[in-house]
Image: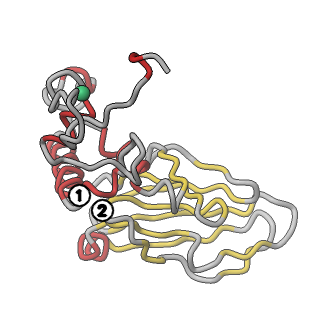
Amino acid sequence: MSASQRYYYCGLKSHADDCIGVNCVCGRIVTAGYLSYENCKKSFDVNQYHPNVYDAINRAVLLRKSYHGETRPIYEFNPYTSMDKLIFKLIHLHTYDFEWFDFHDVQTTRVFQISLSVDSEKIQIVVKNISTITQIITQDFLVLFDIQGSPQEISERVVLQDSEDYVCSLSIADVVKFNSYCLGIKVITNHYLITEIPI
Ligand SMILES: [Zn+2]
């Protein structure tokens, strides 16, 4: 192994060549105490970053809410971030597969078409059976996720004939009380389409 291929695990002060974060990013992360090496591998577990990461996600949401109603393009806002969506996906990668979508874009799964709308009192979710046979919606089909990624079921168990609609109405007061980060539509177990609630 040549010297350039050797891993030094900087920041542990376990060898003479430890740069203590002067020359490498890993060394800087470990020396500053942000994270430690995961299972003696040169990788980091993002979950170690709790709970600060949730505060950061919260602030990102508040920032976007402060721009609510603005019609200027995103690149004109300073600051602006949607990095929390990627971080949220990464944190939960071992449990869930999250796919972000825009609240106003109609979503289609194998058997359902789902459209969302919002007014000052409620969020309305219309689920249409687009298959040719009867389908069952389960309680966990629609969920609210809080910032920690805990789901709260919001749909009911409903039997839908072909091309029949199920309308789920959710009061804004409940959404605020639960402190929702996003709304999820279950595609299959542990795989959700998720969207930010525009309130
Ligand atoms: Zn180093």
> How much space separates mark 2 and mark 1, taking CA atoms?
6 Å
> Residue 174: x and y, percent?
30, 76
> Residue 185: x and y, percent?
55, 61
Q: Judge left or right: residue 164 versus residue 39.
A: right
Q: In the image, what residue occupies the spot 18% across and 34% down?
A: 28
Q: Judge left or right: residue 183 versus residue 105.
A: left
Q: In the image, what residue occupies the spot 23% across and 58% down?
A: 54
Above or below — where is 103 with respect to 185? above
Amino acid carrying mark 1 in the image: Tyr
C-beta proximity under 8 Å, tags 2 and 1: yes
The disc placed on residue 147 is: 2
* Residue 175 falls in image quadrant: bottom left
Looking at the rendered structure, the secondary structure element under dot 1 is helix
Above or below — where is 16 with respect to 122? above
> Residue 161: x and y, percent?
79, 73
Camera-side residue: 138 or 49?
49
Above or below — where is 97 with respect to 164? above
Camera-side residue: 120 or 2?
2
Amino acid carrying mark 2 in the image: Ile
Check disc 1 and report the residue beneath it.
54
Q: In the image, what residue occupies the spot 44% across and 21% down?
A: 5
The disc placed on residue 95 is: none
Camera-side residue: 131 or 146?
146
Q: Judge left or right: residue 18 versus residue 148.
A: left
Looking at the rendered structure, the secondary structure element under dot 2 is loop
Asked whether mark 2 lies closer than 8 Å to ligand 1, one says no
Q: In which quarter of the image is ligand 1?
A: top left
